[in-house]
Image (tube, rainbow, N blue to C red):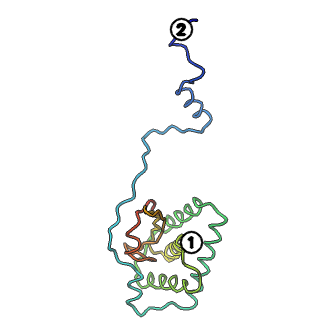
Amino acid sequence: PASPDPASPDPAFPDPASSVMALMGHAQLLEMDAPAAPMPCPARASGRESLLDRLEASDHRSSTAATIAASLHITSVRAQLRLRSLSGIFARLRRSKNAVRNWRHAPDEALAIVAAFAASARVLRSHDQCLPRSLALAHAFIRAGLAADLLLAVRLRPFAAHCWVEHDGLIANDRAAHVDSYQPILIL
């Protein structure tokens, strides 16, 4: 028998370059000009203050109308999460943030929004509802022209995912002791 010619391709082992070219031709693999390594989220300082702490220290209470409005908005976001893709919901949040031209600094108004969402927990289930509650709160801040970042985070051992909103460097809808155990993976 003749020995195989090392220059001839072996059909059992296709040329990797031709496989890559075929994928590129079918638009299943895209070529990029620059290396596209994921960027890590910036480190967050631990022991930060929460607007919930400020709310408890104040005599501020939510009106019935504000609590109902917050509850309705959370319910609406829950429905959207069932009907729409998460990427579409996140894109909508980004568009909303980009549409605001001038962010306002209004600590009392931010506290009033937080109070309404905190009071809604007495009406609506809040356990394991951090995503719809945080999305609704972020939208409420943005509609009021107040800066808001939605943070999605994870922790290991045991694995858990969580999200919350930050406003002007303050945690809006959680406590520092709780969020400090999570590492943000996405900030919107």
- Residue 51 percent location from the top left of the image: 40, 80
- The image quadrant that residue 176 belongs to is bottom left
Seen as rendered, the residue at the extreme front is 1
Q: Residue 15, relative to residue 101: is it above or below? A: above
Please provide percent x and percent y for residue 18.
56, 26
Amino acid on which the number 1 mark rests in the picture: Pro
Q: Residue at x 34, y 62 (%)?
A: 43
Q: Residue at x 44, y 71 (%)?
A: 102
- In the image, is residue 114 above or below residue 21? below
- Viewed as shown, does residue 111 lie left or right of 127? left
What's the residue at 60%, 30% (across, down)? Answer: 22
Counting from the top left corner in percent of width and height, residue 116 is at 52, 85
Expressed as whole percent of the image width and height from the top left, the position of residue 72 reads: 62, 80
Q: Nearer the viewer, mark 2 or mark 1?
A: 2
Which numbered tag is attached to residue 3? Answer: 2
Which quadrant of the view contains residue 84? bottom right
Residue underneath mark 1: 132
**Cα distance in 3D space between marks 2 and 1:** 66 Å
Circle 2 SS class: loop
Give the quarter of the image for residue 15. top right
Residue density around tag 2, few if under 14, some if 14–19, many if 20 or more, within 10 Å: few
| Residue at the top extreme of this rendering | 1
